[in-house]
Each structure stands twice: as C-alpha cells, then as structure tokens.
Image (cartoon, coloured by chain):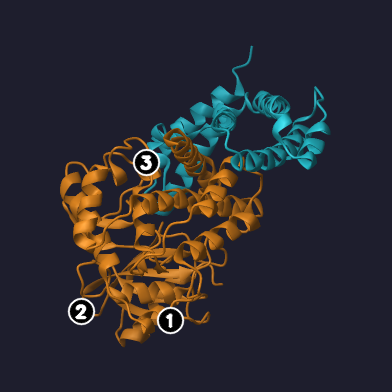
Chain colours: A orange, B cyan
Amino acid sequence: MESNNDLPSLFISYYSKFTDKDLSLVSFERVFGGASRETFRILVKDEVGSEEKLILRRTQESSLIETSQSTEYLAYSAYQGTLVPVPAMIDINEDEETLGAPFMLMQQLDGIAASPFTPDAYSPHEEELGEQFWSILGEIAKKDINDDFINQFDNATEDPCWKKELDKWVEVIKEDSLSIEPILDAGIRKLYEKPPKDPNKTSLVHGDYRNGNFLFKENKITGILDWEMAHIGDPLEDLGWALSPIWSWQDRNKPAYLIDRQASLSIWEGSSGLTIDNNDLKWWELFACVKGMAIWISAGNEFKTGKNVDPINLFSPWIPGDIHLEIILDILEGDLNET
Amino acid sequence: MKPEINIALMNAAQEILTRFSPLIEDEYEQSRLNSWGALILISAMKFNQSYSSLVKENNNIINWLTKTKQIYSKELLREIDQIQVEEGLEQSILDEQNQLLRAILVKAHKEVDSMDDIDVKKDCLKLLREMHSHRKVSDLIGLLQPADS
C-alpha cells in the first residue's frame, strides 16, 4: 500500500483524470471515520477556481472489522434521494494500483460529527436532532428491499437474523480475545439461551447507527455516515445499538444524548411503521454489548499483535470495553431481579 | 522523598489533554494524542493497584468456588480441588493463575445458570460485579472529555 505521504499527489492525479479537468489540491487531511477505512477530507480546485469538497475512504491493510467496500457503497447508493441523508457517491475502485488500496470517493456533506462521548454535543438542539435521529432510523428500517438487493449482500444464509449476527461476532471474540472475560461469556450464553423471534420484515441494517456517526448543522441532521457494517437483518438490531447506554454514558436517560427513551421509541415506531416487541428489543440491546465487546477486543488484538498500533486501538478495549461489560452486568442483574 | 511516578504521569496526561492537544490543528493527529493522554491517565491511576487487585480477584474467585463447590459436577469439582493457593507470586504468574481461575469460574457460572437457584445466580453476578470493580475505568470517561475519538 502507498504511504499516506504519496497519497495526495496520487489522488489529484487520479481525480484530474477521472473528471478530465486540470485540478489542484487545496487541502488533504485525514479524519477519523469508521473502523475499517482510512478517511480523508479533501478540497480541490479547478482551473477557474471552483472548489469541490470530497471524502475519500480507502481500505486499510489492517482494520478492526473486515468489511466489503462494495457493501458500504451499495448501502450509500440505496438511500440516494430518500429521507435518509447520505452523500452522493462519485466512484468506487477495487484496484490497488490507483491509490495503493481499494477506495470509495463521495461528496462531502455540510455539518460536523460530534464525539459519542460528549454529553452536551447537541445542545441546545437535542429535541429537533433527536426527532430526526430516531425518525431517520425508522426510515432506514422501512425501506422495502427486494431479493435482488438482498442477494448483493454477502450475509445471506438460511439462519435466522439473530443467529447470523451473533455467530459472526462470537467468532471474532473467539479469534481475538487476549484474556478470559466471565461477564462477556455470561452475556453470550444468555443470548443463545433466549433468542428473539425472526422479524416479520427484514431490513437493511446500518450496523453502526449511533450518535457520532451522523453529521449535523445546528438543528438539522445533514448526513448519516459509516455504513461499513451494513447488512440485511432485523431492524431492531440498529435500534438496540443506537439505544446502548455506552453512547450516553453520562446521561443514560437520554439515549444518544438526545431525547428520552420512550419518546425515541415512539418516533421510531411512527416512522418505520413497525411495532417493537420489548423482549426482542431487550435481546438486541444485550447483543449490542456483545458486538461492541467484539469490536473493542479486536482493536486490542490489533494493537497487541502490532498489526495496527494506532492508540485508539489501545484506548478502545480499556474504556469502551469496560463500559460494555458494565452494561452486560446491569442487564443480567436486571433480568434476574425480574424473575 | 521523590514524588510518586503515578502522580507525575497523571500530570503529564492532564497537560497532554488540556494544553498540548488543543494546539494541534490536524484532527487525526489530535485524536491520536488524546488517546495517548487517556491511556497515560489510566495507567497512572491503576499503577499502584494492579498487583493487589489481582491478588484480591484471585482470592475472591477461590473463596466463591470453595463456598459453592457442593453444587457442581464431579468434573468441575476435580478442577476446583486442584486449585493451589500460593502467596508472594510474581505478577506474571499471578496473571496466569487469574486466567486459569477465570476459566474455571466461567464453567461454574455455566452450571449455575442451568440451575433454578436464584440466590446462587445472584451471588455469582455479585462476584462478577466485585471483580469488575477492581478494574473499572468506565467512570473515567467524564475526566477524558477531549480524549475520545
């Protein structure tokens, strides 16, 4: 793979050819964006001085989650021109010669992304953003998908949605665990013991829908990002992930640091046209912790084995990993107290 | 008397997070530095406790397994009986012992889960909560506001 030092010149050469214009680079900076691609924010200028803002997502040699680039592209493409705001796609390239690794290019949307760990990130617009956040998630779930579309995703098996996803993440945990974690084991056992019903309607699941993964400008959500874990599955999966207390750890009554849980669920039901089964949602909320743990464990493994020594890979298993274990314990204790 | 190294590390972490990091304009490099600041803070806070926490956790597991051993299968009982308690172990040996004990605890919890005894189930979760509290850093998230990604 080309080093990041060569990337700006490779990029401008590629994009000038792609657009058949004489372009120059105004800025080229790396930003955090998703677990499996390097993300760059780029500004280019043509011969008459018109500027264009772009986002480049390039596959990393080593990434937390092995995901197909085409899956992400497909997901972005599926929601063009809908109520789900997504950036317009410009190109997808699977070869390694052009920029040293497969990449996707898209237009940059207005707005900023907040950290999922900052409680007042959306102040004073929590109400309006909350309404949109849960409503957009409902729109994602509502989208009708046909068999042709489903077949383009590589997770099509006969297994129920819950099992496909749980097996996948448990496998990651088995492969990457550096130590034995009894709380996580107990959570996994609980999930296999009492699975949810298969949904009446399968949906395109975003896979990482949460605060931090959307762009906003004042009181408006301008883009839903990071679709790299998109797959076909149970719409409650996204809901369980977005509701996870890890994303509102310092104010657990307001999921995603937006609005209260009951209001969030009502908006989602209204927008998706689906009815939530509380027991099934509970299962997906515990699943969210196990999936989170798989991601944090995988990050720790990347660091420890020297495959990717980005400090975020060391940070992840510490604090986010610790939080998810605590949530698993809370759920297990809550269940036991109910019996 | 020299200042304690963990106090020095805590100060270093605070300087990184509050003084140096805001000076970096590159968003990605700033995030990396923040992550390091957070990790230095965690290691400073856990510096003095890691050995004693491990000893305490191992003792808690052994005590709990011993206290409840009449409820387990013969195979598990054999494993529990083979646990040897040694004192003054090096940290690396203590770590290995901890992993062995955790593996036995997972098996024990699995057997407990298959029983109808709510009290022993609650007791097992209480032990897990206690173990988690020895390593808990989740409450640091508030201290590390600039240090997330």
**Residue type, numbered disc 2:** Val
The residue marked by circle 1 belongs to what chain? A
Q: Residue B87 location in percent, x, y? A: 80, 22
Q: Is there CB contact under 8 Å for labels 1 and 3?
A: no
Q: Residue A223 location in percent, x, y? A: 26, 62
Mark 1 vs mark 2, foreground winner is: 1
From the image, tell me which residue sits under label 2: A48
Picture disc at residue B22: 3
Secondary structure beneath dot 3 equals helix
Q: CA distance from mark 2 to mark 3?
A: 36 Å
Is residue B147 shown left or right of residue A43?
right
**Residue type, numbered disc 3:** Pro
Is residue A128 shown left or right of residue A280?
left
The residue marked by circle 2 belongs to what chain? A
Q: Is there CB contact under 8 Å for labels 2 and 3?
A: no
Instruction: Give the quadrant of residue B40.
Output: top right
From the image, tell me which residue sits under label 1: A151
Foreground pick, B56 / A202: A202
- Looking at the image, which residue is at 61% across and 27% down? B47
Q: Residue furthest top?
A: B1
